[in-house]
């Protein structure tokens, strides 16, 4: 009887097809690099949706070329990048390029939400937040600037919905993949009721949106057309998973609210899983978790580990050349840079708000580095970047604890940055908590496989699946002396920075 599980993970820079067994071991992997986006004007980020589908097909075919037997699969699931949207016709064919989540287009001057909703937002001081959401929504830009495309749109889908249609022929998607600017009720985990203000902020027809099912429910089956393109068996169950951050939390084994999952990726995040709906920041909802009727309380540093990539590009050519000559990974040498500098970077402290969020800390925020002196080197700056990201996520953890009433006791770290031992150790020291990697780097794919395992009946429930398929990997304990030093810097310097610098940020905003 087939019992292996295929997870398709469509990230920003690659598509991966991953085969897991019921014990959570990775049996086979095929990765296809993709161009994240192209840009026809400053701030725009688009991609031909065929790039994603062709990469899915190539990744699956690569598994069979490795010797994986398609008949060994019990089910397939899908996780994708969040917030990428696609307009399609009745056949599911794209009407225009996908708008990628990194896109920065805005639609200014839209009529504000009025009536009782508008009055309520004004009283609550939330009018600016709602206006920001209206301006950021890709649907509003399309309605305003490409009305002919909008008029011909049969369905308006996230990337997850587009690929689900390609695989199953159905316009259907997972509840847990709905993260973006859509009229979605995050508390009820369904499309918003007809009277909800979101339909005024995003004036679209409900019929444009797909049907939704809960995580681990059946989305459909692989069609003959999809089977011909991918090599997947006709009729193989397609099981609903979640967006990539949510599956990463699940794959890291963070089902209980006292275990936080940090993601050191392009966007750095801290997530905890809860059964109760709470807005850690007012009007910013918790997202659907990769398990039904649960929420991920998420706080993020947009372009978080992008800063690490920026540093390596701007200042790391020496390490990259040495690594190439030695036949080792550049990351090994960058860890040497971190370890060459004492904890606290000799007083160099970084605030990582290169791309500020809406309300955390605020739209006017900018990045800052303070404390420069003649002792500082590029190694200090690199360590300060890693420390600043951990400080910001610790602040997010404290906000979550205060709002939820649940103390975080353990940290799991996923994403590319989790592969650095130096980053893992300073995270343990800054949080003052035991910190571990998941046993597999492919945590988001593993989370999708867990959804597939429950949906296909391989495991009877999520608790059993997590117990069988996840476990901590390398562990890092905080050093008490270093933790004390970080506590002093965090409370006396880092947490004071935004408050002290905010007037300057506002002045800079006015000048711009």
Image: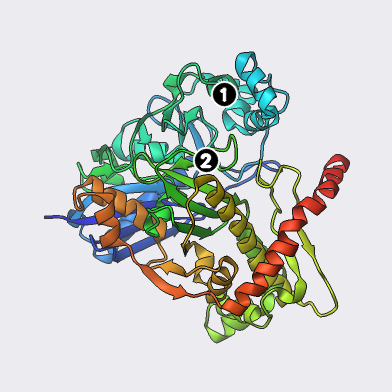
Q: Position of residue 399 (x, y in %)?
A: 58, 50
Task: Judge left or right: residue 23 versus residue 275.
Answer: left
Asked which secondary structure carries label 2, the reply is loop
Percent from the top left, x then y, of residue 144? 64, 23
Q: Position of residue 98 (x, y in %)?
A: 53, 38
Left or right: 462, with 113 as reference point: left
| Residue farthest bottom in this picture | 326
Residue that mark 2 sits on: 83
- Farthest residue to the left: give it: 1
The answer to whether the residue labelled 2 contacts the one labelled 1, judged by CB atoms less than 8 Å apart, is no
Residue 225 higher or lower than 154, as above or below: below
Q: Which residue is mark 1?
A: 202
Left or right relative to 309: residue 180: left
Which of marks 1 and 2 precedes in the sequence?
2
Q: Position of residue 469 (x, y in %)?
A: 29, 61
* Colour scheme: rainbow
Q: Is residue 107 visible?
A: no
The foreground one among 83 and 142 is 83
- Compared with residue 281, is residue 343 higher up or lower down, i.e. above or below? below
Q: Is residue 49 visible?
A: yes
> For residue 108, which quarter of the picture?
top right
Count neighbours of disc 1 (C-alpha within 10 A) and say few if under 14, some if 14 to 19, many if 20 or more. many
């Amino acid at each position: 009887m087939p019992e292996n599980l295929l997870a398709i993970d469509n990230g920003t820079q690659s598509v991966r097809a991953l085969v897991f067994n019921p014990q959570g071991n990775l049996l086979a992997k095929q990765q296809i690099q993709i161009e994240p986006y192209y840009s026809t004007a400053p701030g725009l980020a688009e991609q031909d949706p065929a790039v994603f589908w062709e990469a899915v097909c190539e990744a699956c075919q690569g598994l069979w070329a490795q010797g994986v037997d398609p008949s060994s699969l019990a089910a397939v699931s899908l996780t994708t990048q969040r917030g990428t949207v696609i307009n399609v016709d009745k056949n599911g064919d794209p009407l225009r390029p996908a708008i990628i989540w990194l896109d920065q287009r805005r639609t200014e001057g839209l009529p504000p939400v009025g009536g009782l909703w508008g009055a309520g937002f004004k009283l609550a001081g939330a009018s600016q937040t709602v206006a920001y959401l209206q301006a950021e929504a890709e649907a509003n830009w399309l309605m305003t600037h490409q009305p002919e495309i909008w008029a011909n749109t049969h369905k308006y889908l996230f990337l997850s919905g587009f690929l689900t249609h390609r695989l199953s022929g159905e316009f259907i998607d997972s509840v847990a993949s709905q993260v973006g600017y859509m009229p979605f009720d995050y508390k009820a985990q369904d499309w918003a009721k007809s009277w909800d203000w979101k339909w005024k902020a995003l004036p679209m027809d409900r019929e444009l949106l797909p049907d939704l099912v809960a995580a681990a429910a059946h989305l459909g089956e692989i069609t003959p057309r999809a089977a011909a393109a991918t090599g997947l068996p006709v009729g193989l169950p397609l099981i609903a998973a979640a967006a990539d951050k949510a599956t990463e939390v699940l794959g890291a084994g963070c089902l209980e609210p006292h275990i936080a999952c940090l993601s050191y990726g392009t966007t750095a995040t801290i997530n905890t899983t809860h059964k109760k709906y709470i807005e850690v920041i007012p009007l910013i909802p918790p997202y659907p978790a990769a398990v039904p009727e649960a929420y991920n309380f998420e706080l993020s540093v947009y372009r978080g580990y992008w800063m690490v990539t920026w540093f390596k590009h701007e200042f790391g050519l020496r390490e990259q050349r040495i690594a190439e000559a030695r036949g080792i990974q550049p990351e090994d040498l960058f860890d040497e840079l971190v370890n060459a500098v004492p904890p606290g970077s000799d007083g160099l402290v970084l605030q990582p708000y290169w791309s500020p969020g809406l309300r955390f800390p605020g739209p006017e925020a900018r990045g800052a580095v303070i404390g420069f002196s003649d002792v500082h080197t590029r190694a200090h700056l690199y360590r300060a970047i890693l420390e600043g990201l951990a400080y910001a996520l610790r602040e997010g953890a404290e906000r979550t604890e205060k709002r939820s009433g649940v103390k975080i006791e353990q940290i799991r770290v996923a994403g590319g940055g989790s592969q650095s031992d130096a980053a893992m150790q300073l995270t343990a020291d800054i949080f003052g908590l035991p910190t571990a990697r998941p046993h597999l780097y492919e945590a988001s794919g593993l989370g999708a496989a867990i959804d597939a395992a429950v949906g296909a009946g391989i495991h009877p429930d999520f608790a059993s699946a997590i117990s069988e398929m996840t476990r901590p990997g390398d562990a890092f304990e905080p050093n008490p002396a270093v933790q004390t030093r970080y506590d002093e810097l965090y409370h006396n310097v880092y947490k004071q920075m935004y408050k002290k610098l905010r007037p300057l940020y506002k002045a800079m905003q006015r000048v711009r």
